[in-house]
Amino acid sequence: MRKIAANYIFPIVGEPIKNGYVVFDNNNCVVEIGQLNGECQDTEFYNGILCPGFTNAHTHIELSHLVNLFEQGTGMSGFINQINALRCAVDKEGRLKALKDQIDILYAQGVSAMCDISNCNESFNYKSATPMFTRTFVELFGTEPQDAEDVLNGGKEVVASAKEFGLAAAITPHSPYTMSPELLQMASKEGLKSGFLSYHNQESMEEEDMISKGTGALAENYKGRGLSTPPVTGKPALVYFIDNLLTFASAPIEGRINLVHNTVINQESIDYAKKNLKEPYFTICPLSNIFIHRMLPPLELMRNNNLKICLGTDSLSSNTVLSIAKEILCIHNNFPDIPLHEILTWACLNGAYAVGKEDELGSFEIGKKPGAVLISNIDWDEFKLTQNSTTRRIL
């Protein structure tokens, strides 16, 4: 048994508890939550905030070798050019070391689960060895309709490899601009058999312009490379995605669909998602959005619509560090009115729902095994993280 206490406990389900404590049994299950009343015997007390383990709701751990190689502020078209040029800039040994190091860092900093995007099997051995739960999404690309079936079959082979390592894995579509409608529909239908999808949604105005008008830097990039582009719809990119799902499924579409980035999401898109998707999640990756686009998602709009927001880091090709603490600090700096309790709900419980582990992770509740994370160096006057804040796993 361990009785762990701190200046504040954030159970997530319920208000923060000053001088609170959580008792864990020998199987790391929560058995008691309360407030200290002068007792100290057998109590581990920490200065800071104690919260459940985080869920990193979007990352590409296999791109960890690309840290500090990318120019920032290039927009999506420029970012894609860099990915194409630099993805294999490091040999396999270096790639494996980089992803293993980042998996270890994420766990030590308190991440208990992650949604990880994979394009190959390089990360599977290390993901299977970590105590973190990983839901692996095998991401598909392919702009040419005639290639769709072969691309899908290749993805199924990667999924089969992931399952050999005991990983929860399934096909997922990448984005509207990297896929023919045929592949988008086939990948989505296959992926939803697992009950989960992850999809890059409305990450940039370049994406919106390409789908709605057939114009812009991203459209010109694809045309310049001789690649087919999606049909011009006159509608937002998220509407285009959902309309493709509706070719094989009826609304409200079943499954936990993780819509990632949402940098330029708008009310029309939100209304359409709420109407047609039974359980959508809206993951934000603030530092990545600044890195590539010098933009942030419209969080006030998203909050006003009561969306289930989750928090991710994206990859080290579009970020300088994989740190939930730094993502939270970015939100503090740009949206100072959003309470810490709400942001931690995104980072803990909403993410646990998105990966299907809400019965075990995401909150301090009796019977759960969420882990325990200490957040240090708090600005107690503002109740916010600071530039010096760190997170580390206590349990």
Image (cartoon, rainbow, N blue to C red):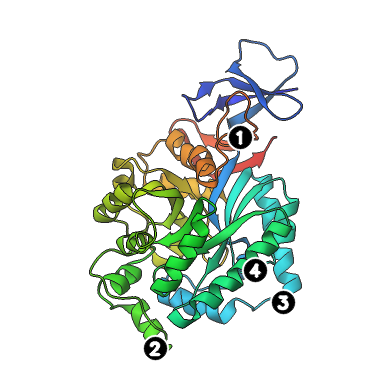
- Mark positioned earlier in the residue sequence (1 or 3): 3
Give the quarter of the image for residue 358. Answer: top right
Q: Which mark is residue 91?
A: 3
State which quarter of the image contains the C terminus.
top right
Residue found 28% across the figure and 77% down from its top: 214
Gap in angstroms between the C-alphas marked 2 and 3:
29 Å
Neighbour tally class for label 2: few under 14, some 14-19, many 20 plus, Cα within 10 Å? few
Mark 4 — residue? Answer: 157
Quarter containing the N terminus? top right
Question: Circle 4 sits in a helix, a strand or a loop, which is it?
Answer: helix
- Identify the residue under disc 2: 224
> What residue does disc 1 label?
360
Q: Secondary structure at mark 3?
A: loop
Mark 4 Cα shell of 10 Å, populated few (<14), some (14-19), many (≥20): some
Ranked by sequence position, the earlier of labels 1 and 4 is 4
Mark 1 or 4: the one toward you: 4
Q: Nearer the viewer, mark 2 or mark 3?
A: 2
Q: CA distance from mark 2 to mark 1?
A: 48 Å
Seen at 69% across and 57% down, the residue is 163
Q: Position of residue 96 (x, y in %)?
A: 73, 66
In the picture, measured across the screen, residue 300 lies left or right of residue 113, that is: left
Q: Is residue 3 above or below residue 310?
A: above
* In the depicted structure, whether residue 193 falls above or below residue 359: below
- Work out how far the residue at label 4 is from the one at label 2, CA to CA, in angstroms: 31 Å
Q: Is residue 336 left or right of residue 100?
A: left
Q: Position of residue 350 (x, y in %)?
A: 48, 41
